[in-house]
Image: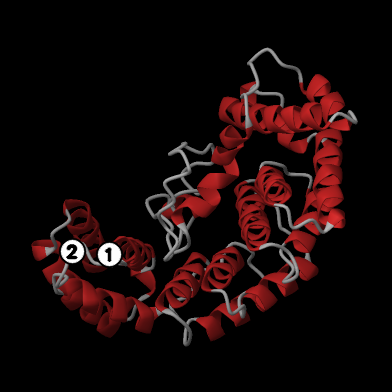
Amino acid sequence: MSRDDFETERPLTADDADPALPPVQPPSAGFIVQLFVVPALIVLAVVGVWALFGKIASSDEDWRELVEDIRNTNEHRRWRGANGLATLLVRDQQLGDDGQQLASNPEIARVLVGLFEEGLNRHSQREDDLKQEAFLARTLGLLDSQATVLPALERGMKPEQDREVRKNSIASAAVISFRADERHEAVNSPSLVEDLVAASSDSDSLIRDTATYALGLVSTPASRNRLAVLVTGGDINTRVNAAVGLARQNSTVGLPVFKEVLTGAAAPPADPEAPGQVESLLAVKNVLHAVRILAGQWTPSQRGELAALIDPISRNHAEPRIRTDAIDALVALRKS
């Protein structure tokens, strides 16, 4: 099973809808908006929200000029530089091998981390300052200098930080972890896993769900052990996050959660407009995809159980895309 096998999934939580964010398409092979049951716009924001902070950098701007702007004492120039550099990073990633590979540029990492930590050190509660910190936390997810960036993100996800800063720090750590895996590189940071494990117990469901999502992307014994605990308790989003996270790591431990979601999907909702319907649809989609990817690992008995639950979904579900996903899952189960 490869990471690309999960490209058709999409994230969500109860905070899924945020009309303030633009529907920007990210550069990372579908991962950012297509994995797990976490807030759909959390990781989208990693590449989208810089547009809320002023004029987007022009295509001919050089990263060196923007770095110098960030080092300037003029507050307006500093944030124009940060905003422009975030935009430039996204554009560079979209160019792939033809780009400058700015995500790995250590000077860019140092200057952005320095600005982020400067904001954290102020301990300001001003709304504008907190928005800037959250913006920088998202922007750090565009960088691949792990030794420089991850310690700053770990600090950003601590309980004493603002909720948006914490959320975006966790999401950025997940993005960095995924890109590292695409390059067949490990994220060797026990302290990051420890912080994510701690955040997965947070009383705030948004932080908890996002941390569970991130744990699914950092494949270590500690993360798997925590996911195995989360899959048996907590709210449905956390449990589905944990189950699909384990599926990414080739584990079928999430079977009871998959069955729970599929059982509920067979019956049409009493009120299609009721709150939570978007989350429910995305949970079904993600579960169907996980079942398909693990098709060869289910026992004959488990395949029979899953097929029986999925068959009515493939025939009767109101959403055509869900029916298509259900048919794909059935085909995979019957071929195994």
Most foreground residue, 76 or 236? 76
Residue at the location (42% across, 46% down)? Answer: 19
Cβ atoms at labels 1 and 2 below 8 Å apart = yes
Compare marks 1 and 2 and give the one earlier in the sequence: 2
Residue at the location (51% across, 46% down)? Answer: 44
Residue position for label 2: 272
107 lies above or below 265: above
| Residue 188 is at least partly visible in this image | no
Q: Position of residue 191 (x, y in %)?
A: 79, 69
Extreme residue in the top direction: 60
Most foreground residue, 42 or 316? 42
Picture quarter with the C terminus: bottom left
Residue position for label 1: 277
Give the side of residue 8 with respect to residue 184, left or right. Answer: left
Q: Which mark is residue 71?
A: none
Extreme residue in the left direction: 316
Q: Amino acid at mark 2?
A: Pro
Most foreground residue, 90 or 334? 90
80 lies above or below 282: above
Q: Position of residue 87 (x, y in %)?
A: 63, 29
